[in-house]
Image: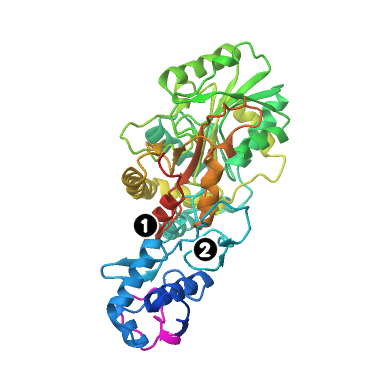
Amino acid sequence: MEKTWATSADPAASGRGGTASGADLHLDLSGPGGVRAALVRALRDAVRSGRLTPGTRLPSSRSLAGDLGMARNTVADAYGELVAEGWLTARQGSGTRVAQAPAVRPAAPARSGSPVRSASAGGLVRPPARPLHDLRTGTADISSFPRTVWAAAARRALTAAPNEAFGYGDVRGRVELRTALAEYLARARGVRAEPERIVVCGGFMQGLALLGGVLRRRGTRAAAVESYGFWEHHDVFTRAGLRQVPIPVDDRGADVTGLDGRRDVGAVLLTPAHQFPTGVHLHPDRRTAVVEWAGRTGGLVVEDDYDGEFRYDGRQVGALQGLAPDRVVYCGTTSKSLSPALRLSWMVLPEDVAAEVVRAKSTGEWRTGTLEQLTLAEFITSGAYDRHVRSMRLRYRRRRDRLVAALAEHAPHIRVTGIAAGLHVVLELPPGTEQSTLQAAHWQGLALEGLSRYRHAAAPPLPPEGPDGVIVAYGTPADHTFPGVLEALLRSLPPAD
């Protein structure tokens, strides 16, 4: 039996006049199992094939029953089954819609890319060609970029800019921005800085590359890095000619005690406010230890203030630079607080290092856009930056709370760590389940990363019992998709023993 019914013409429509103006959708209601099973199968196939796209509103059970000539309860039961399976969502006032992350998961583990037979649908299914939701780290909620306020700041900055601002300018960056940053960082992060010791760069990686070159020319042969961290940063040091010496990371942060006696190590790269990816902050004793190491050896501490502005437990962790401004290079960026598209970052440097970085920056195409710098300076001095960060901190905290609550209710066997700050958490998994969890998430349309991805290749081998874990970034999904993201994530996790 074949039937045709009308979907909502606008996938985002909500309660605007039924289906009279909608698009026709052909359903094949033939096959075994009765009318209800046939309807479930037909709707599931329509979602899987893409004929019903995520967010599409379905007719009410009464309307569809009339179109198909079947009992309303039959349609309601079919909708209910598909909601339970994750193909549809149903909310009061919003109706029944195609889920943002349809439930596509193999009945048994299979090789990546292999078709898997779905017992419920009776057909071959594949994971989505690309993730429906990106839960990988490194990106904030770019949909919340304050376009109107930023545009107003840009207009004011352009109006007030002197003519000389449109020349090549100071290689350190616009003085307006360096002055605004010096005041803001002192107030918000406890950084001790003067505008003359701040160098503006085109992103964190550019600043790290400049600094790596300076370290190598100073005679530094090796830099210590956390045993878990961004491999991209390690690559920057490698290209600068610096070997990396991984140091242990535990629940107190990075441990530098093993550096005593390592005369080849002249610098250490740390994420003390929110260690990436474990999420712990550097314990006060360890903060003291690393500063003392730098003082004893003449070494340099490179502080990546990763997620320093997004702390939720009320205990602000000040910048390490405030303890030893002559031995610490403080690095910050707008990539999380505003947008990575701005390509704006800064380094607060010891005076002698600042002079060398400026010389290195003046020898190549390392300059940063003047208009973006002037706009950010105005954005900060007007108070808009503080307001935006506070607003986003509240938004991210609410998302974190929803994520933690969902895990506590539906997956209490999964330990959640790194929740005090930042835009991601770590889910600790049973030994040996990291890769299978990533595969399950892939089938659910989620892009996730495992903890092992960020383990330094030169770090000591881990024991067989782990740790295994996945990193869940909650900053990227839009608010309206977050419930579906949580449902898909929960379906991806290993069951309790």
- Residue 483, label in figure: 1
Q: Residue at x 41, y 85 (%)?
A: 5
The residue nearer to you, when weighing 250 against 141, is 250
The residues bearing labels 1 and 2 have C-alpha atoms spaced at a distance of 25 Å
* Number of the front mark, 1 or 2: 2
Q: Which residue is mark 2?
A: 118
> What is the three-letter code of the residue carrying label 2?
Ser
In the rendered image, residue 211, in percent from the top left (x then y), is placed at 64, 32
Badge 1 density bin: few <14, some 14–19, many ≥20, Cα 10 Å: many
Relative to residue 182, is residue 287 depicted above or below? above
The residue nearer to you, when weighing 103 against 33, is 33
Residue 373: tell me if it is visible: yes
Quadrant of the frame with the C terminus? top left
Relative to residue 80, is residue 181 depicted above or below? above
Residue extending farthest to the left is 92
Q: Residue at x 43, y 50 (%)?
A: 475
**Earlier sequence position, callout 1 versus callout 2:** 2
